Image (cartoon, rainbow, N blue to C red):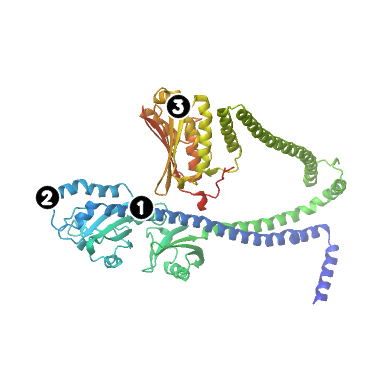
Amino acid sequence: MIRRLRRQWARFAFAFGHMNLQTRLFASYILIILIPIIVFAIYIFNEFYKTTNQDILKANEYMLEMENKNMQNNIEMMERTGQLAVSDRNVTSYLYAGHEPDTEALIDFSTNVVPNLLRLQFNNPNIAHVRLYTSNANVKEIWPIFLDESRIAEEPWHREVLRQRGKEVWAFDSQDKDVMRRTLNPVSVPVGKISLLREIGYPNGSHLGLIQVDMLLENFFPKAFGQLQDDRSHVLLLDRSSSKLIYNKDVSFFGTVSLPALQGQFERHLDDPKGYFSFKDNGISYIGMFRKLDHLDVYLLNVVSLEESFGKINKTRNMLILLSMTLIAILSLLTFWANKFILKKFHLLRDSMKRVRKGDFQVQIDIRGGGEVGELAHHFKMMMGKINGLIADAVNKQAATKEAELKALKNQINSHFLYNTLENLKMMAEVEAQYKIADSLTSLGGMMRYNLHWSGNFVRFKDEINHIKNYIAIMNVRYEDRIRLACLIPPEFHEQDILKMSLQPIVENAVIHGLTSSGLAQASGLLITIEAYANDRTTVIELKDNGPGMAPELVRSINEKIRLDPAAADKGIGLRNVNQRIQMHYGIEYGIQLESVPGEYTKVVMRLPKLIWTGGQGEHAQAFDH
């Protein structure tokens, strides 16, 4: 076999060597251009398929993550609404009434308690209903909040809620039923909803009733049931308890894919908390990505059609192969007419390239006229000019790099020189018993070290406070100790993750406006108070001064400028810059707000996420214990 292959190759080489140039070029086009292009196209477009697949997975995994976050936020909102509704003692007393309330008590309850419950629903636009059901015969129904438990006794989830004895139960419903039955023929709204259900309290072992908090599915799962849909992908749910698919039936996407086939493919992966799978249906490729929502015992599933994405790649691949074959045909026709004009100039160009290869970059090519060879000679000249220019640039860049290194070393030496100079001045001041000057130099050195050591955007709260103390110490030299600083910061906030230099602009504003304006601060000095406390999962930092305060119109104007885009707001507003940095690093739900009462105080409230540096959630912070 090997000998036979060798003989065939020898015959081919002999025949190829005796072909004329035209035939050899045509064969070369096929061997060197067409076949590699086909192989390369197959490889490249396979990579395109993989890359497109991965991009689709990443994009839709992000979408699933966002949908999951929306769902978690809605769960917390519903749980918080339900907890607020039943935490009112007046509500539980009403549900546990041992006798029928008189008219005056009923009017008072309807006037003072029921509106609070209605506000829980109306203040949260996504909440559809908040209802309390009771079987106490002494309790009167007050629509739409307080209803008799018999209205929902036939619901499939009623017995399960009682069995759970106070634990949460989540239930899906394809219709928003009219449980109040205000007509003889109650009408149900044909929109899906999800309900949070829980039995209310057990004082003395008694059953008070049930609470139901409803949210429409289009609000709970905005991607799956919202108005804006993508024709190439869609989100749906699988309820594990009923093995039922829940989806928006008005979406045309589900008219092209077989839901039983989709569910059959998906149920093979029910043991996995999240993942993806591929399948084909009616000749169309699909990707299904899923994520288990343990809180609701459902799976969030996103199905993506690959027909359009892969169709474009296939079309591009076919066009590339067709274009290559067309190009080879054109080249074969032109080769015969171009040979006699090309070969002579090719030799001259070849000799010039040999001289360049030996290191002669000043070679001159005397080839004039148009055509491919003339153009090649022109570009060769341009390339030589570019090479010479790059060599010169490389030399200049090397010199510039050395100069930059020297400047960096000089700056480092200058900073150490400044630190050493301040330390010597401090020692001289202490020798001369000028302790106030020594303390000021110590504060100034601390501020310089804090400002120049900028290896990250985050520091610990206590480091920023130490920087503020140094700043106040220096300002008191100027203002003759008329500034006092009070830090009401519990120890658990010392390791709070905070943006570097985020408090100084606020304190600096307080000093400038508090001492330069007329008022209490001018007479008795300026008191700046920094207080920190927790509010749910948020750390709140309040910076308050006893300056002259500001008019409400000015406070409102400054708050508007703080919230505006940089292009729309005035330049140079320090508070706006601090607010933008906080929102850029932590999110738009955080930031600062200005409050003031004329003649009393001015206060800046800063809200940050509760990230403790030593707890591992703020490892990007830098410490300044030295």
Q: Indicate left or right for 250 with 59 as reference.
A: left
Q: CA distance from mark 1 to mark 2?
A: 34 Å
Secondary structure of residue under mark 1: helix
Q: Indicate left or right for 132 with 372 as reference.
A: left
One can see residue 18 in this view: no
Q: Specify which label sits upstream in the sequence, 2 or 3.
A: 2
Q: Indicate left or right for 110 with 268 as reference.
A: left
Give how far across and how far down residue 367 sits, in percent: 84, 42
Q: How many marks?
A: 3
Quarter of the C terminus within the rendering:
top right
Mark 1: which amino acid?
Met
Q: Specify which label sits upstream in the sequence, 1 or 3.
A: 1
| Image point (58%, 36%), residue name | 446
Instruction: Please state which of residues 175 and 531 is positioned toward the viewer in this rendering.
Output: 531
Write down the residue under mark 2. Answer: 103
Write down the residue under mark 3. Answer: 513
Give how far across and how far down residue 486 sits, in percent: 44, 36
| Image point (63%, 33%), residue name | 423
Mark 3: which amino acid?
His
One can see residue 305 in this view: yes
Give how far across and how far down residue 509 sits, in percent: 47, 30
Q: Which mark, residue 77?
A: 1
Could you classify mark 3 by the number of other residues whose Cα lies within 10 Å: few (under 14), some (14-19), or many (20 or more)? some
Give how far across and how far down residue 593 sits, in percent: 41, 37
